[in-house]
C-alpha cells in the first residue's frame, strides 16, 4: 500500500485543510505499525508470612514473563486468594496466580525433595520450573480464548508446551521433571495429574528429542510413548504454532 503523501501535488498542498494534513501525516507515520500488546505483572501486598515467601519465590523465579506475541494486552496479578489456584479471566484479560497455590507447591516440592535428599540448588530449579508451568498453562488458556478457540485444560497444556519451549528453553527439562514429581499430588492446579503430566512431558520432549533427551532418560515420559512424541508435538505445532510465536525483538 502506497503512502497517501506520495499522491499529494506539492503545488496544491496549501489548499489542504490543516486537520486533513495532520491526519495524512499520522496515517503515513504509522503505516504498517501494529499495536504491541504487553503483559504487565502486579504483585499485591501479601497478608501473611507464607504469602510473603510465595511472592518472593515468584519474583525471584522470573516465571511471570513472556516474549510471546499476544493478541491483546494481558495483566498478571499475584495475590492472596481464598483458594489455592491460578485462573484466567477472559472478561478482565487477567491471569491470577494465588500466593496460596505457590505456597502449597513450595511445601509439596520441599517434601518431595527431602525424600529424594535433593540439594537446595535442585529444589530451587524445580520450583522455578514448576512456577513457569503454572504461568504458561494459564497463558495457554488466555491464548485459547483470545484467539477464539475452544478452551480446556488440554488445550492450555498444548499452548503451554509451545510457549515454554519458545520462551524458556532452559526450563523445559526442569518443567517436565517438576510436573512429574508433583503429578500424584492433588490441589496443585496444572501440576497435578499423572496422565496430564505424561502428555505434557511428551510434547516437551518431542519438540527436540536430542536436546531434551533427559526427559526420556528420566522416565518423565512413558518409554513406550517416547518414539511418538515428535509426531505429537508436530501435530500441536501445526495446529497452534502460528498463535504461539515470539514477538519480534
Image: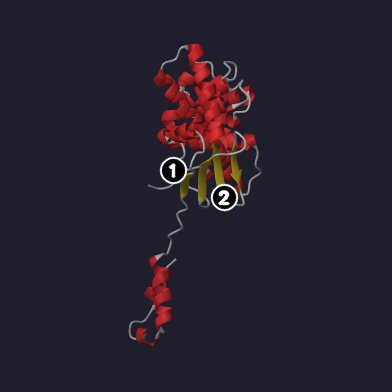
* Residue 190 screen position, x and y as percent: 59, 31
Q: Which residue is mark 2?
A: 93
Q: CA distance from mark 1 to mark 2?
A: 17 Å
Q: Determine whether the residue tagged by mark 2 lies in a helix, strand or loop.
A: loop
Q: Determine whether the residue tagged by mark 1 lies in a helix, strand or loop.
A: loop
Position above or below: 145 against 2: above
Q: Earlier in the sequence, mark 1 or mark 2?
A: 1
**Residue pictured at 33% horizontal, 85% vertical:** 11
What colour scheme does the image use? secondary structure
Residue 175 numbered tag: none
* Residue 194 screen position, x and y as percent: 62, 22
Question: Which is nearer the eye, 26 or 5?
Answer: 26
Q: Which residue is mark 1?
A: 67
Q: Residue furthest left?
A: 11
Question: Which is nearer the eye, 86 or 133?
Answer: 86
Quick check: can you spot residue 203?
A: no
* Residue 25 screen position, x and y as percent: 38, 72
Position above or below: 211 against 2: above
Q: Residues within 10 Å of mark 1 (few under 14, many from 20)?
A: some
Position above or below: 194 against 237: above
**Residue pictured at 52% horizontal, 32% vertical:** 133
The nearer-to-camera label among 1 and 2 is 2
Query: Which quarter of the image is occupied by the N terminus?
Result: bottom left
Res 220 quadrant in image: top right
Question: Which is nearer the eye, 43 or 30?
Answer: 43
Position above or below: 156 against 113: below
Quick check: can you spot residue 174?
A: yes
* Residue 186 screen position, x and y as percent: 63, 24
**Residue pictured at 40% horizontal, 76% vertical:** 22
- Left or right position of 13 against 38: left
Question: Which is nearer the eye, 152 or 113?
Answer: 113
Q: Residue furthest front?
A: 48
Amino acid at each position: 500500500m502506497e503512502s497517501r503523501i506520495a499522491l499529494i501535488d506539492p503545488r496544491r498542498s496549501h489548499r489542504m485543510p490543516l486537520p486533513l494534513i495532520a491526519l495524512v501525516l499520522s496515517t503515513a507515520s504509522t503505516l504498517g505499525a501494529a499495536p504491541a500488546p504487553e503483559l504487565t505483572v502486579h504483585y499485591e501486598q501479601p497478608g501473611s508470612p507464607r504469602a510473603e515467601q510465595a511472592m518472593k519465590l515468584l519474583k525471584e523465579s522470573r516465571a511471570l514473563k513472556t516474549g510471546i506475541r499476544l493478541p491483546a494486552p494481558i495483566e498478571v496479578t499475584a495475590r492472596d486468594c481464598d483458594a489455592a489456584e491460578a485462573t484466567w479471566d477472559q472478561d478482565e484479560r487477567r491471569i491470577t496466580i494465588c500466593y496460596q497455590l505457590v505456597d502449597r507447591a513450595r511445601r509439596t516440592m520441599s517434601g518431595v525433595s527431602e525424600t529424594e535428599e535433593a540439594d537446595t540448588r535442585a529444589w530451587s530449579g524445580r520450583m522455578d520450573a514448576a512456577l513457569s508451568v503454572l504461568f504458561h498453562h494459564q497463558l495457554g488458556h488466555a491464548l485459547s480464548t483470545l484467539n477464539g478457540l475452544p478452551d480446556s485444560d488440554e488445550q492450555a497444556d498444548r499452548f503451554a508446551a509451545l510457549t515454554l519451549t519458545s520462551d524458556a528453553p532452559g526450563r523445559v527439562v526442569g518443567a517436565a521433571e517438576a510436573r512429574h514429581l508433583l503429578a500424584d499430588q492433588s490441589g496443585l492446579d496444572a501440576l497435578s495429574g499423572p496422565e496430564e503430566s505424561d502428555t505434557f512431558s511428551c510434547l516437551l520432549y518431542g519438540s527436540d528429542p536430542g536436546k531434551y533427551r533427559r526427559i526420556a532418560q528420566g522416565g518423565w515420559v512413558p518409554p513406550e510413548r517416547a518414539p511418538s512424541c515428535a509426531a505429537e508435538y508436530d501435530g500441536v505445532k501445526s495446529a497452534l504454532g502460528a498463535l504461539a510465536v515470539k514477538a519480534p525483538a
